Structures are given as C-alpha cells and as structure tokens.
Amino acid sequence: MTSLNRKLLRQLWKMKVQLLAIALVIASGTALLVMSLTTIEALEETTAAYYERTRFADVFAHAKRVPEYRKREIGEIAGVRLVETRIDERAILNVAGYLEPVVAQVISLPDSGPQLLNALVIRSGRLVDPKRANEVVVSEPFAEAHRLKPGDGIEAILRGRKRTLEIVGTALSPEFVYAIAPGGLMPDDARFGILWMGRDALSAAFDLKASFNGVAVSLLPGADVSDTIRRLDNILAPYGGIGAYGREDQTSNWFLESEIAQQKNLSRVMPSIFLAVAAFLTNLVMARLVDTERREIGLLKALGYTNWTVGWHYFKLVLAIGTTGVVIGSLAGAWLGHWNTELYTKFYRFPFLLYRPGPDAFIVSATISLTAALAGSLTASYRAVRLPPAEAMRPPSPPTYRRLFTTRFAFSGPDEPTRMILRRITRWPGRALLTSLGLAMSAAVTLMALQWVDAIDTLAETVFERGQHQDATIAFDELHPLKAVWDFENLPGVLSVEPYRYLSARISRGHLSERQGIIGIPESAILSPVFDVSRGRLEIPAGGLVVSRKLAELLRIQIGDTVIVQLLEGHRASFSVRVVQLFETYIGKPAYMEMGALNRLAGDGRVASGLHIRMDEADRSGLLARLKGIPGIASIQFRHAAIDTFYNTMGETIFIFIGFFIAFSMTLSLGVTYNSIRIAISERAQEFATLRILGFTRWEISYILLGEVGLLTWLAIPLGAAIGLALAWWMTSAFETELYRVPLVLQNSTYGKAAVIMLASVSACAAVARRRLDRLDLIAALKTRE
C-alpha cells in the first residue's frame, strides 16, 4: 500500500462520521432514483408479460346490437389478426349483508373453445360450464371485498329479471387491471365487480341471440390502428356503434400508463434535489480539507508527487464517499423499489409480479450519483493541484479585517458572544448563505411532501362537497323519457331529482381532436352543476359549449371559437358549436351543454341518460332496497362512497410518500448541520480553546458555535418556504394529467410543520456536536502549528 493510500485510509477513519453524513445524503438521492427506475421497469415488464400471455386486444368497440355475421367483415379489415365478439352488459347485484346496490359489468365467455383475446387468469375454482346458465366467474378483488368464494350464490338483476347466480371461480383479467366503475375515479371493489357468464346464457338474458354488442380486435405488427378504428366504426355505425378506440384509450390501460408516466416524472425531479445537496456538501468539506492540508500538499509536491497524483488522491477520497453512498442507496433503493411495486399491486391487480431489476437502473443511478459528488469536488481538487509548493508551505494569508458599515448599527447592542456570531456571518456571507441554502433544501423537500395533504383535502372539498350536492347518481341502460325520470321523485326517501344527458363524442378543431363525452344538464342545475374551482357554480347558457380548461388546452381553443362535434352514438349527428365559456376543474376534462339543446342536436327528443338524486337519510335503507329492484338501471354511484374511496386510496399512498420524504429531508438537514458544525470546530478549535482559557464558560463557547448554526437555521426557514413553494409548483405541474390536476395549496400550518421538522433534526445534531465541543482538548488545540 502506498503512502498516499495509507494517508487516505487514516483520513477516512478520522472523518468517518462527517463523511458518512455526506454518504447518506448521496444514498438518499441514489435510493430515490433506484426506487423509481426499478419500479418503472417492474411495472412495464409485468404489464408487457401479462398482456402478452393473456393476448390483450389492441382495439375495442361497443354497439347496441350487431348481427354475428358481421364478425367476418371485421376480420377482413387489413391488419386484423384476431377478432372476438362478445356480450358486455350491466347488472345490479344484491350482495348478502351489504346494504347498497352493487354495480356489475357482465361479460360473456365463449361457449366453445378458449378465449382468443383478453383471456382470464383463474385464481380459484374453474371457468363456467356452458350448459349451466346460472354459473359465473367473478373478479378476484370483488370476491375479496365481499368474502365470496366458489360455491356461494349472488342475486343479480339482469334486464329487469332477478336471478340467483352461482359463483364457480374467481379470476383476473387484463382488461381490468384497474377496475373502475363507469363514472368513477378510483377502484371501489365493494361497489363494482366484474362477472363472466357463458355466451348463450347471457345472450338469452339480454335478448342478443346470434348478436353481439362488444368486440375486441388484435392487430398484426405494423398495422395502422387509426385506420382499423375508422373501418370498424363504419361497420358498427348502423348498429348503434359508440366509437372504437385503441388500447391507449382503454380505461384500465390508460390509468396504468399514466401511473408509469408519473413515476418517470418523479425519477427526474426528486433525486436531483438530493444529489445537488450532496454536491454542495462535498464541495464544502473538500474546500475546507484542502485549506487545512496546505502544508501536507506542499510537502507532497516538494517530495516529487505530481499534480495529477495529488489531485487523484483527493478524487479517491470523494470516490470513497460516493461509493459508500451508492452502495447504501442501491440496497435501500432495491428494497424500496420492490416494496413500492408491491404497493402498486393493491391498486393495479396483476396475477404475478416481475420485479427483476436489471443492472441498467443501478448503473445509471451510480453514474449520476458519483458524477454529482465528483462535480462538487472539482473546485477544491483544482485548488490542490494548482497550489505551488512554496506557497503551500507558508500559512495562508490572514483575512483582511476592516470596519463594516453594519458594525456601527448591528453590533453595538448585543453582548460579545452574539457579536462574534454576527461578525463571522457578515464577514463570510457566501459560506453562511450556502449553509442556509442546504438547510433550506431540507425544509423545502418536507414542505413539498406535506403540500400533498393540503392539495388532496382541497381537491376533495372542491369536487365532492362544493361542486356536487347529490347523494347518488343513477345511470340507465337505455335512454328514458324525461316524464319517466321525474317519476323517481315519488320514491320514498327521494327529496329531489335532476336529470342529465351523456353523449359519447369526438370534439375537433382543425387537426386536433379529442374523444370526450358531452354532459347535458338543465339550465338551472343545482345538484351537479358546472362548477369552477375559483368562481363556484356557473349558469349554463341555453346554447353553446362550456369547456374545461384542460380540454381547451388540448384543442387550443378559446371563448368564441367554433368546434366540430361528432357524436359517437345514436344518430351519430355531426354539428358545429361555439365555445361560450371556459371553467377550471381538478377532475377530468369535461364539456357541458344545456340539456335541451344537446337533445335537439342529437335528434333524440326529451330524454335522459340518468339522474342525480338527493335522499332523506331517515329513509335511506328503504330507498336502497327499492333501487335494487328497479329495472333499467345500469349503475348507481354514491357521493359519500366516492369520497371514502378517494381518501382511502390516496391515504394509503400519500402518507407513505410523505413519510419517505420527511425521512430523506431529515437526512439532508443532518448532513448539512453536522458537516457545518464539524468543520467549524476543526477551524476554530484554537479560538475556542483560547476563549476557554480567557474565562468563557462551556455554555458561552457552545452558544458561539451553535448560535451561528441556529441563526442560519432561522434564516433558512423563509428561504426553505420559498424554495418549497417553487418545488411544490414544479411537482404539481409535472403530475398534471388529463384525469386530474393537483391544486397548489399550502396552509400556514404546513409551513409550520416543515419548520418544526427541520428544527428538530438540527437540534438533535446540535446536541451531538455540543458533547464533542465539551470534550475539546484545550492543550492539543493550542499546539497549532504556524
């Protein structure tokens, strides 16, 4: 072992705690990066394998009633490899022991042969026997929510007829990795389930003999998806086709791909914060180290060591720190990645999980982390390389002290220890600013994490409490005359009703086009009006289109512009309509019209797709029992259930997310604080020893050292608040999707919590440093070489 390597090992051991603090900051950034990259890799690999094994379709379409012989025509479309027709309907279930009616999507299984596309993965039991009309397979999440198992019975209303179905198996499907009810925002396995029945049994129940109303298509590699969709729409249009769509617009897959995209955003944003602080700490420590080792550097060069050898020596010190951080971070990141991926399987139901992180994630993370650490040491290493031996052998020139203009005003009142603190900060403002900046970053990360609680509370309050006033939303399986809708007011427990119309459509302007349904509501809608997050309830004009800001951004439209609306159901009317108002919403990208105007343009008369109702809580149980038996209801959504599901789903992930980042932010503050204090003790040991001999007490010496850190910590609080606000804005912008926008909301209490967390970590670190200061060897400190 060479002399320099022995020196390196002694140095590493002497500074072990100080360097470990930097390594832990590097480890935090590395762990976040590894966690994000391995989670993305696992989700993408699991999704691809699952879709391939179950032959997940490329194109989907729905219609009212299509003769089975049209299947051959679909199969003749250029690029089509496989076609599977089916029956896809809605049902209301009466689950024993569960008060509310449950919505089910009922899908047919082939009576002969295996499923060609979207094959089920049986989790327990078996598939249905085509000869037994009442057998069903249920989705595993739904079965778990109600503790159902093969052999149990379940009561269902199929097209107004009550039937008792026998559960013979539970399964998972690639179509329902994210099983969400129509009109829902998040999975609610207790209130929405998937049932699979034999084709003959289901066609008889819904009067679809020799017909189908759903089709899935698999394409050959390189086939034109948009052309296939256009041709499929032309075939299904005479039969009430609602518009074909590709895999990217399939609900479950769309949610899954959006989650993966958000993970990619996270992998770019968060690790960079920690690695930037790691570079700052490395620069801080290495700069001070080179200053204190001037004599050693001069001796090395005088003995014949080259500039390259000296520079490489200090680079190896940084590599040792960085490698330690990378190893710790890689191990922690691999564990966190596996844990994070398993957490996702609670919401995205896969039959298996492929967490097999390859070397790429670790190589990329290690390269970025080491590069950040080495970049932080470049300036200090360059100074060591450029330092002439003769210059290095002399003590550094003392700083030039001069009377500052602030001295007369700021330093005339406080006592002597306080003046020492203020004088040191004002004479080295750059050093003080960098220390405050490091502490501010830890507070900013905490603030950014805590902001999500405020944002979620605001989002839920705005959408579910201020923007909606109905207790339940009922959707019909077919259009109902408005006269029949008003009959629901006569049901016991119903206080008021409000109809609505929903039409699937494609809205276009120029070459831009979006598949987006249009909601028709009464002009004086109260229960579920158009609601702007800042302006509140908006009156809907008698003519024209009211468009959400997100949809307006996607189509690049403003008030006064004209768009083309192509309805994808009914008579498939096409018309031009003027945009008369824009509004801001946190959920989706909806578009509204006055209900009467929309019905006239659609050519369907005075009809409704469903209704919103307000219920009397005293008669709630009686009303729910009546709703279970009313024919023609396709689904029922309860507002209170949507709120509960929203908080339950978000709560499981957000508080874990917050816990992670609070732990990482405390690592930041500990790393910055400990290094600042340790460097100050090393630099000022002789000064502190002299003050002790002159009669200063241990408390006064501690006050001089820790008071400086305390003052810089207090200065870091407003700086951290400003940086945290910027980071929160950055994160909310990065996480904005078509599904939801996270509002940028920071309560005063949130600022206080972030400050308290930072102060607690700094105080803990200061307590440790105080013990070291108390054990300062005065004699050794005074034997400083000049």
Image (spheres, rainbow, N blue to C red):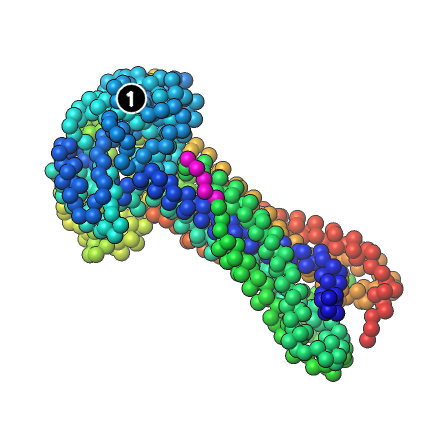
Residue nearest the observer in this picture, 260 or 689: 260
Question: Within the magenta stretch, is there residue 403?
Answer: no
Give the residue drawn at x 86%, y 69%: 783
Residue 698: percent from the left, percent from the top? 83, 57
Left or right of residue 417: residue 617: left
- Residue that badge 1 annotates: 129
Magenta extent = 351-355
Give the residue drawn at x 20%, y 39%: 242
Which amino acid lies under the numbered mark 1 shown in the image of this protein?
A: Asp
Left or right of residue 525: residue 644: right
From what the image shows, is residue 444 above or below residue 5?
A: above
From what the image shows, is residue 201 above or below residue 706?
A: above
Quadrant housing the N terminus = bottom right
Left or right of residue 629: residue 29: right
Give the residue drawn at x 29%, y 53%: 554
Q: What crowding class fits label 1: few (fewer than 14 Cα within 10 Å), some (14-19), or many (20 or more)?
A: some
Give the residue drawn at x 54%, y 47%: 334
Residue lying farthest to the bottom in this orientation: 390
Residue 743: percent from the left, percent from the top? 42, 48
Q: Secondary structure at mark 1?
A: loop
Residue nearest the observer in this picture, 523 or 766: 766
From what the image shows, is residue 335 above or below residue 156?
A: below
User: Residue 599 sits in which quadrant?
Assistant: top left
Residue nearest the observer in this picture, 525 or 163: 163
Residue 220, visible in the rendered structure: yes
Type of secondary structure dominating the magenta stretch? loop
User: Residue 636 sits in which quadrant?
Assistant: top left
Residue 14: percent from the left, percent from the top? 75, 60
Quadrant housing the C terminus = bottom right
Residue 608, visible in the rendered structure: no
Left or right of residue 241: residue 535: right
